[in-house]
Image (spheres, rainbow, N blue to C red):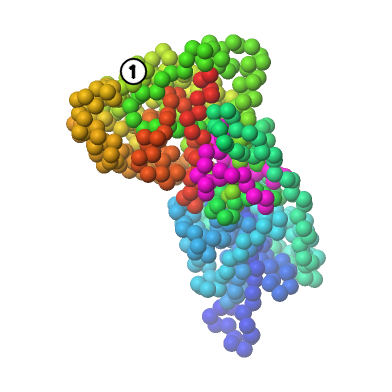
Amino acid sequence: MTGAGADPEAGPAREFVVEADGGSRGNPGPAGYGAVVLDAATGETLAEAAEYLGVVTNNVAEYRGLVAGLRAARELDPDATVRVRMDSKLVVEQMSGRWKIKHPDMKPLAAEAARVFPPGRVTYEWIPRAQNKHADRLANEAMDAGARGERWSPSTSTADLDTGRSAGGRTATGGGARAGSGTGAETGAASAARTGAPGAARPPAEPTAPAEPTVPAEPTAPGATGSAADPTAVPGASASDTNGTRGAEADAGPPAARGDATGAPGPAGGRGAGAVEGQAAVGGARSASGGSAVRGGAGAAGPAGPEADPRPDAASEAAAGSGAPGSAGSSTTSQAAASADVRAARTVASPGWAPPDMGAPATFVLLRHGETPLTPQKRFSGSGGSDPSLSAAGREQAEKVAASLARRGTVQAIVASPLARTRETAGIVAARLGLEVAVEDGLRETDFGAWEGLTFGEVRERYPDDLNAWLSSPDAEPTGGGESFAATGARVAATRDRLVAAYAGRTVLLVSHVTPIKTFVRLALGAPPESLFRMELSAASLSAVAYYADGGASVRLFNDTSHLR
């Protein structure tokens, strides 16, 4: 059959099954896809496609695998009907039209996939990962070949034999489709046609390791829950093995679909619940056994309003962990501090209730700057005032934050507000972590107008009506043409969207102020504007929010000051 000119007496069109997968070792990291075309009636393997893609995300690799599989099926019979089977909930739901496609990297790939066959000729079905081993192993073969500086070759592939699907011989042909590296364009014959007896049904996958046990959250996050992850995992490390396990992934998705790699329900406090989960923010990287590996950073968020949060007392600072000025310095204290940071990272590595195919989230670790001379005096200090630098206490706090984040080892980039106190705090942390600091104007504090430098009581005395209006409506501006909370919220939301797109799958430290950090948290929770007055955010505190590919968000941590004690 050759398409539009096919003989009408030739009988009904063939039906194919396309199984596709993709993986990224680092997300984003070195990536590849695999796809296989099967005869729907016999289960025989008809064509394979695989390609090393360079550095892209899991989701992009999965979409590229889908496109390649559909193209290979079309080359075999352009009049065929196709049933796509993938273990990516994201791709299946988006291509079925049930989920919106928001990510700019995935929109053109989804459109490309939709053009391969006419509408209505392709259906999509989600399958467990254990049933997608053939495509998964092809993807890993492609990644392994790329790591050697080679291209995947069908003549050396053992993916079909490893799954026990085909009993026939293997011959390389020019009939298969293959997506070109980085562009999705076809580059030549890269599939393998199968001959011989129809293949047997695929054997069950190797037993999947049970989910790691739940570990308690740190004392500063009461009620938090989370599942343990491998404390030795390197952030962004590959999770691939010789059995074809896919690269690093994070778990996210609709609340009803949440679960870990074994299908067991995830812990409470997942993304759908919007609950605080733990002590450090980490995107989950899947290990070869199906568990979760630490991949993110710690974080915290707090209240909007003036610089009014008191510093820790002397006794608290004397008890600070290793690396903090004024600490006892004993090896026991150092080990305890390091252990606490590992537990913190493990706690927030919990996959929650999400399916394991969203890819790693963009995780924002939200650091409020250290104290300035105005902070202990509880004075309004926004972006329209004197722009104070850190005090000695503030610099000490920044050093303690830096030591804590260095122990956790999860922050991959640093972005700061342009104000002096945030840039100074970010610089101290960056020097410890060996990173550069990018400046983002959208992270600046609210402009408090004529209230800059005043205490709350002084504003109450001088501008009572304006203050009452400000406390009653997010649209009210501080006296003298300051910035309303509504305006700040719109600015922060736009900044969030830019940064999520720029740092997809990465853990980023955002050094900002009270109002923007509380706004990040409020927006993630879907809370009303008045919630800004119901949050407490201390100087040099950490909060964290993770943002997923489907547009959802999860608050992972809030107002953590354990590193200051």
Q: Which region of the structure is painted magenta? A: 263-291
* Residue shown at 33% from the left, 18% from the top: 377
* Residue shown at 27% from the left, 23% from the top: 457
User: Does the segment drawn in magenta span residue 269?
Assistant: yes
Magenta stretch: helix, strand or loop mostly: loop
Q: Which secondary structure, mark 1?
A: loop
For label 1, count other residues whose C-alpha is less than 10 Å away and answer few (under 14), some (14-19) or many (20+).
some
Q: Is residue 207 visible?
A: yes
In screen coordinates, is 17 left or right of 378? right
| Picture coordinates of residue 151, whole percent (x, y) | 64, 50
Where, by quadrant of the figure, is residue 333 drawn? Answer: top right
Q: Which residue is mark 1?
A: 377
| Picture coordinates of residue 247, whole percent (x, y) | 64, 45
Where, by quadrant of the figure, is residue 487 drawn? Answer: top left
User: Does the segment drawn in magenta span residue 131?
Assistant: no
Q: Is residue 29 visible?
A: no
- Closest to the observer, 365 or 213: 213
- Closest to the observer, 351 or 509: 351
Vertical side of 439 occupied by 139: above or below: below
* Residue shown at 47% from the left, 57% from the top: 101
| Picture coordinates of residue 313, whole percent (x, y) | 47, 15
- Closest to the observer, 210 or 144: 210
In screen coordinates, is 444 left or right of 23? left
Vertical side of 135 occupied by 193: above or below: below
Query: Amino acid under label 1?
Result: Gln
